[in-house]
Image (cartoon, helix red, strand yellow):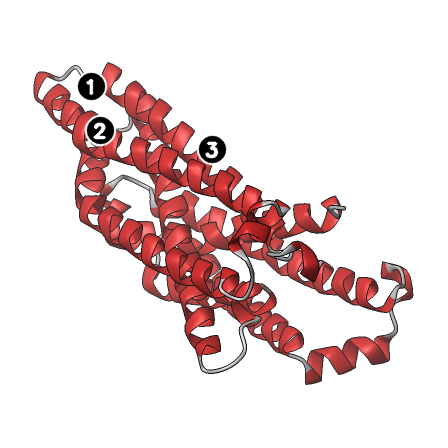
Amino acid sequence: MADWEIIGLRWVLYLSLALVTGLPIFARLSRSDDLPNASVPQAWIVLVLALCAMCLSVLGFAMQVATMTGSTLFDVDATIVSSLLDQTSLGLALKVRLFAILAAAILAAAALARHSAGWFLQAMAGAVALGTLAWSGHGAATDGPGGWVHLVADIIHLIAAAAWIGALLGFLSMLNAVRRRQDSAASATYRALANFAATGSVLVSVLILTGLTNGWYILKEGSLRDALFAPYAQLLILKLILFAVMLGLASLNRFRLTPALRDALKRREEGSAIENLRRSIILELTAGVVILFLVAWLGTLAPFPSIQ
């Protein structure tokens, strides 16, 4: 039976860290700073989400300890908590994550103070924090020489997904700025879309390659027939369907809607093109957020029924 509190917490944590990582990556690679005042709201988002992720990480660790010891959150033994923090990979992951999140928050606060952003350092801190989530998932469960391959593939998969999600939110923010008729916003949005096109192709390739690697390591130990009847495989299939939807929308944006915006800018009639892009990106972002929910859920399930 699903533990919805843990799944919900994992979902919000995944989403928070994905954006803490993905927004700086988007800003760095798309050169979105040429949109007036773009760095300030993005830095605010990173700061708030970093603080949220820090609280959720501590709460999630406490919930895991309570589950393992059969106690409540308020009755967790401090000695057990200390032991888990110092002697387990789960504790090490939490400490590394909190340190990285704190670094991201400090960098975001510094960006707000000087109205500019060190996106590269923020992205690095976020990526470290996000990568620690793989230590408590299926990526860390593989034994033998392939264990590190699986773990690294899982971490890269998370970072690539974060870059995609962050880009979608970044583009949506820019499109909303166009609707508010900020100066140069429409042209800046088109340039950001054009600059990010090649990066998007790389992200998709990385996601497919690392996804196949993760799937092979997770499913190779059991019967594929048994796996297909397990909730894990059913959710995984749903995730793949949503991924295909995101791919379709991304292709639509790149090959039809973005060129349409370019042509509309030449005619100074970009209103309709902006709205079409905005609707498409909202749908794509929604699919991405649902995928993160499925990822959070999948992390609580065993791939094969016999392992439950």
Q: Which residue is located at x 58 percent, y 63 percent?
A: 137
Q: CA distance from mark 3 to mark 1?
A: 24 Å
Mark carried by residue 286: 3
Q: Is residue 300 visible?
A: no
Q: Is residue 177 above or below residue 89?
A: above
Disc 2 target residue? 186
Earlier-in-chain disc, 1 versus 2: 2
Tag 3 secondary structure: helix
User: In the picture provided, is 34 more to the left or to the right than 150?
Assistant: left
Amino acid beneath label 1: Glu
Q: Secondary structure at mark 1?
A: loop
Q: Quadrant of residue 272?
A: top left
Residue 83 visible in this rendered orientation of the protein: yes
Q: Earlier in the sequence, mark 3 or mark 1?
A: 1
Give the quarter of the image for residue 90. Answer: bottom right
In this image, 291 relative to 184: left or right?
A: right
Marks 1 and 2 close (CB-CB < 8 Å):
yes
Residue 210 spot, x, y in % from top left: 37, 60
Identity of the residue furthest to the bottom in this view: 87
Mark pair 1, 2: CA separation: 8 Å
Q: What x and y, as percent, mark residue 26?
A: 32, 50
Q: Which residue is mark 1?
A: 270
Circle 2 residues within 10 Å: few <14, some 14–19, many ≥20:
many
Residues 178 and 91: in front is: 91
Q: Residue at x 39, y 50 (%)?
A: 23
Few, some or many residues within 10 Å of mark 1 (<14, 14–19, 20+) = some
Q: Which amino acid lies under the numbered mark 3 shown in the image of this protein?
A: Thr
